[in-house]
């Protein structure tokens, strides 16, 4: 019997193009002793490695057949399939607002009984709990691989000039000034593509804004005008050290400029490294944690779950899907994936860390990692555009206007979620009295 999902979520899904072709539907297997498990992977750039994972699983299992589908626009296709009650067993999904919405709609199975979860780094399990719109009991995803964001830097240039990696905000601003005096552009930004503004914003926020900031705002205990004041100050303080007229240049422009030595640093995530190497394959790239704190102890690595696996409640072969999760969490498969895609293993253990992220190793090993705040921002709010507008606004009231709009838009686009959270908290308080 298939379980029903929330009507409100279905109404949203029905707006998706229902005429879109179904992708990756599990084929009917005439041998009833063999159960088919479909894994819908949202990362089309990882098609090759997932095909290899599929091959290795099927070579070692006689009673379960794994079928991996990696369509473009996987989340749109998944929504279409959910409307038609055509459920894959497993979805590979990012740790972001899509995961939050699917979980909130009651679509994911509680997988607390999966033994592999005991080997996952606690920091990433905690990240998933913060993605719950309303607190829930249980575990609904197995984190697999993560990424990291901070400051990419030109290692050869740093070595040539004797520049040192900064560990606090004063050291960072001093470094920018020193680089500028050497006649080199300290930072490139590429803010024409508005989403690039979120890279420095997130990396700053995980250091100088409280991790519970969003929860306090949703509970009515605080405002973003208060919680994000230091973040707004520090991202603005970076502006004199980035290229002139940054909204004239996009992400690809920034990648090319950094790759060609036109700037010493770029505030972006590790996901940009392949784009940089497409321009300059031999570049020596380093990456350090955004030194946003007044003291190094305030700093945290901005690291989020790049891909994790959830089991759909409405799927047919949930127990077999659990066995697939155990297979995915094996050292062999994790190393296979990291070799192909890079990133950070979510599993505890001695897994390779890309050379470009070696300066972040201490943070990764010690678990000093915080999720991307924008993973909790509703897409309708267009926070990236809000930040871009603020950064190019030179008026004396720019910060005040920005944070007040952040607060008003948050209340507008999160109205239903805020109401449900406050109802939940009132109920919890009543039951505990």
Image: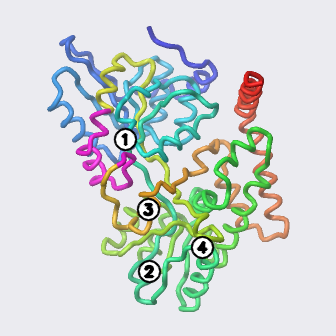
Q: Is residue 141 magenta?
A: no
Q: Is residue 143 left or right of residue 229?
A: left
Give the residue at mark 2.
261
- Residue highlighted by disc 1: 119
In what element is the residue under mark 3? helix
Q: Which residues are magenta?
A: 326-348
- The way the protein has been coloured in the rendering is rainbow
Label 2 – label 3 distance at C-alpha: 15 Å
Pointer 4 and pointer 1: residues touching (CB < 8 Å)? no
Mark 4 or mark 3, earlier in chain: 4
| Spatial CA span between label 2 and label 4 | 24 Å
C-alpha gap between disc 4 and disc 1: 33 Å
Q: Is residue 337 magenta?
A: yes
Q: Is residue 64 or residue 263 the one in the foreground?
A: 64
Question: Residue 277, relative to residue 42: is it above or below?
Answer: below
Instruction: Note whether residue 349 is visible.
Output: yes
Pointer 2 local density, CA inside 10 Å: few below 14, some 14–19, many at least 20: some
Residue at image mark 3: 272
Within 10 Å of disc 4 (Cα), the crowding (few <14, some 14-19, many 20+) is some
Horizontal side of 73 relative to 134 (left or right) equals left
Q: Specify the quadrant that holds the C terminus.
A: top right
């Amino acid at each position: 019997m298939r379980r029903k999902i929330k009507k409100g979520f279905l109404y949203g899904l029905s707006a998706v193009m229902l005429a879109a072709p179904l992708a990756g539907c599990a084929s009917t297997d005439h041998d009833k002793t063999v159960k088919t498990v479909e894994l819908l992977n949202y990362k089309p750039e990882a098609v090759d490695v997932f095909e290899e994972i599929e091959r290795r699983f099927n070579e070692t299992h006689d009673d379960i057949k794994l079928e991996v589908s990696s369509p473009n626009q996987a989340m749109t296709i998944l929504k279409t399939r959910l409307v038609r009650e055509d459920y894959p067993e497993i979805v590979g999904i990012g740790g972001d607002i899509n995961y939050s919405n699917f979980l909130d709609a009651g679509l994911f199975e509680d997988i607390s009984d999966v033994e592999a979860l005991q080997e996952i780094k606690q920091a990433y399990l905690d990240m998933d709990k913060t993605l719950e719109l309303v607190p829930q009991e249980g575990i609904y995803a197995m984190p697999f691989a993560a990424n990291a964001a901070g400051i990419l830097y030109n290692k050869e240039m740093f070595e040539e000039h004797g520049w040192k990696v900064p560990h606090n905000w004063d050291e960072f601003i001093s470094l920018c000034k020193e680089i500028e005096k050497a006649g080199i552009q300290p930072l490139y930004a590429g803010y024409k593509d508005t989403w690039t503004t979120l890279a420095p914003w997130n990396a700053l926020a995980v250091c100088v804004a409280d991790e519970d900031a969003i929860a306090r705002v949703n509970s009515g205990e605080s405002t973003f005008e208060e919680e994000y004041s230091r973040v707004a100050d520090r991202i603005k303080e970076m502006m004199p050290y980035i290229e002139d007229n940054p909204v004239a240049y996009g992400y690809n422009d920034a990648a090319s400029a950094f790759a060609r030595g036109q700037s010493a640093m770029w505030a972006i995530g590790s996901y940009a490294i392949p784009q940089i190497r497409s321009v300059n394959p031999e570049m020596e790239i380093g990456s350090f944690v955004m030194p946003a704190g007044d003291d190094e102890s305030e700093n945290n690595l901005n690291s989020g779950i790049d891909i994790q696996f959830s089991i759909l409640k409405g799927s047919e072969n949930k127990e077999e899907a659990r066995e697939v999760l155990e297979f995915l969490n094996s050292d062999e498969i994790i190393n296979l994936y990291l070799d192909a895609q890079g990133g950070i293993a979510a599993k505890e253990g001695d897994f390779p860390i890309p050379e470009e992220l070696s300066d972040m190793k201490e943070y990764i090993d010690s678990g000093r990692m915080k999720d991307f705040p924008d993973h909790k921002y509703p897409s309708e709010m267009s926070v990236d555009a809000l930040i871009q507008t603020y950064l190019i606004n030179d008026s004396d009231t720019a910060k005040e206007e920005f944070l007040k709009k952040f607060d008003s838009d948050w209340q507008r686009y999160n109205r239903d979620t805020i109401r449900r959270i406050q109802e939940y908290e009132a109920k919890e308080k009543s039951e505990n009295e």
